[in-house]
Amino acid sequence: MQRLIERGLTVELIGEELSCVGPDEDARDVRQQLEQESFDVCGVCDRSGVIRFVECTDLKSGVVGDYSKPIPPEHKVDHLAPLWSALPRIVQVGRLFIKGPDDEEGIVTIADLNKQPARLLMFGCVSTLEMTMLELIRQHYDEDRWTAHLSPGRLDHAKKLQEERLKGGFELDLVGCLQFCDKARVCLKTIKICEGWCTGQSEGERLFKNLGRLRDHLAHGQDFVLDGDWKNIIANLQGARRLIQKSLDLLCTGAEGREVARGVLEACQ
């Protein structure tokens, strides 16, 4: 999963073909066409290929070439660039032009982040954090002493889930039946884990609340962009990635921990 998040999912998987027009086409006609197709921009090309772009709202009278602008280097991204590293730029700029073998061939916008490859990346990030939290709890507690950090209601929920899974033939310990929010609570209540994460409890609770909310929307196939707050979504995902790395560092403490961490890394790969 680590490899998939960092390198396996690329920008071209969510990009769209860039609609292009000639520089001599009528500006009003092109604007009408773009509005009908709900496009904000299009490429402006000549015989040498796409060289500039134009925004729909700029088009008034005359020809398209009068309104075309060069594509800034910071607004370009390679088609094989990892989606993870491009996410902050897509959110910051609003769109990136995808540079393929034949120059600018596509475009990726914030709306494309609702597509399945992007959703898989985000869900995978949160799920990997959940996996490392599970192993941290197992490493720091003998038997079920972690239960002191959960309410009776949350424990009953985990026990019922364990019973159902045992009936189905799945041999799972109780900690393996905890929900994402329960694992987060136990870890945040464990001083050594909190210190290793270098995060305060209130800060951690806020991050996990946001991640849990994002995870639920992704898992249920819902539109998870609430209030258009993509900057916070990206910040929360980056926070999750930092905790994953710090968790793996904690798991590598001691011989037993190194063996557990090796198992987690093998599972992620």
Image (cartoon, rainbow, N blue to C red):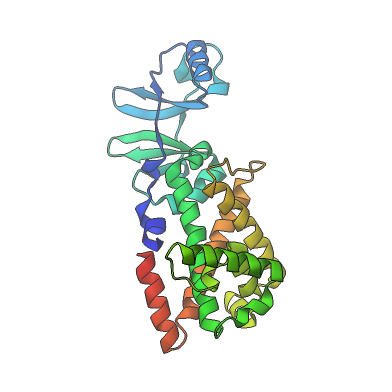
The residue drawn where x is 53% and y is 22% is 56
Indicate the position of residue 155 as horizontal and vertical percent values: 64, 70
Decide if residue 93 is in sight here.
yes
- Number of disc labels: 0
Q: In this rendering, is residue 102 above or below 48? A: below
Q: Is residue 242 visible?
A: no
| Quadrant of the rendered image containing residue 226 | top right
Residue 218 percent coordinates (x, y): 53, 48
- The answer to whether residue 135 is left or right of residue 159 is left
At 42% across and 29% down in the image, what residue appears? Answer: 52
Give the quadrant of the N terminus: bottom left
- Where residue 192 appears, as percent x and y from the top left, is 60, 82
Q: Which residue lies most toward the bottom here?
A: 255
> In the image, is residue 234 above or below residue 197?
above
The one nearer the camera, 106 or 128, is 128
Where in the figure is residue 60, as x and y percent of width and height? 56, 14
Quick check: 105 left or right of 56? left
Residue 18 in the image: above or below residue 147: above
- Image quarter of the C terminus: bottom left
Q: Nearer the viewer, residue 110 or 264?
A: 264
Q: Is residue 220 above or below residue 23?
A: below
